[in-house]
Image (cartoon, helix red, strand yellow):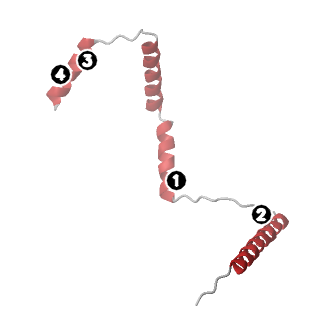
Amino acid sequence: MEITNPKTNLINQTYSSKTSDKIKKENSNIKEETGQRDSDKVNLSNRTKDIQKIFTAMDNNVENKERATRIANIKEDVQANKYKVDAEKIAEKMVKFLMDT
């Protein structure tokens, strides 16, 4: 059997909120005394660390830097309307690709 009374519910809510506030205050006092702070901590697996090293190495790769430079130059030419498409070159590469496959 459950007995509910609005007054007892109000008392329980008040008591629980005061209790939780008191606990929070005590915890903050302890942290201030010990110099501890709330912080998050992330631990990465060895495999993840290896993958990060690989990506870093790829970013520092000379070929990637050369390619990025070449792309930047093409972008500048396109924006300045200086980029010219060589139709014969494109046709040759398309035919070569189709013949190789």
Q: Report the residue marked by disc 3.
A: 90
Of tags 2 and 4, the one toward the viewer is: 2
Of tags 3 and 2, the one toward the viewer is: 2
Residue 88 percent location from the top left of the image: 23, 12
Q: Report the residue marked by disc 1.
A: 49
Residue 18 percent location from the top left of the image: 78, 72
Q: Is mark 1 on a helix, strand or loop?
A: helix
Task: Tell me, yes or no, whether the two marked residues, 3 and 1, touch with CB atoms within 8 Å.
Answer: no
State which tag comes first along the sequence, 2 or 1. 2
Residue 19 percent location from the top left of the image: 76, 75
Residue 70 falls in image quadrant: top left
Amino acid under label 2?
Gln
Q: Residue 36: which numbered mark, if any? A: 2
Of tags 3 and 1, the one toward the viewer is: 3
Q: How far apart are marks 1 and 4 (CA)?
A: 44 Å
Which is more toward the observer, 15 or 52? Answer: 15
Amino acid under label 3?
Ile
Q: Distance between the residues labelled 2 and 1?
A: 28 Å
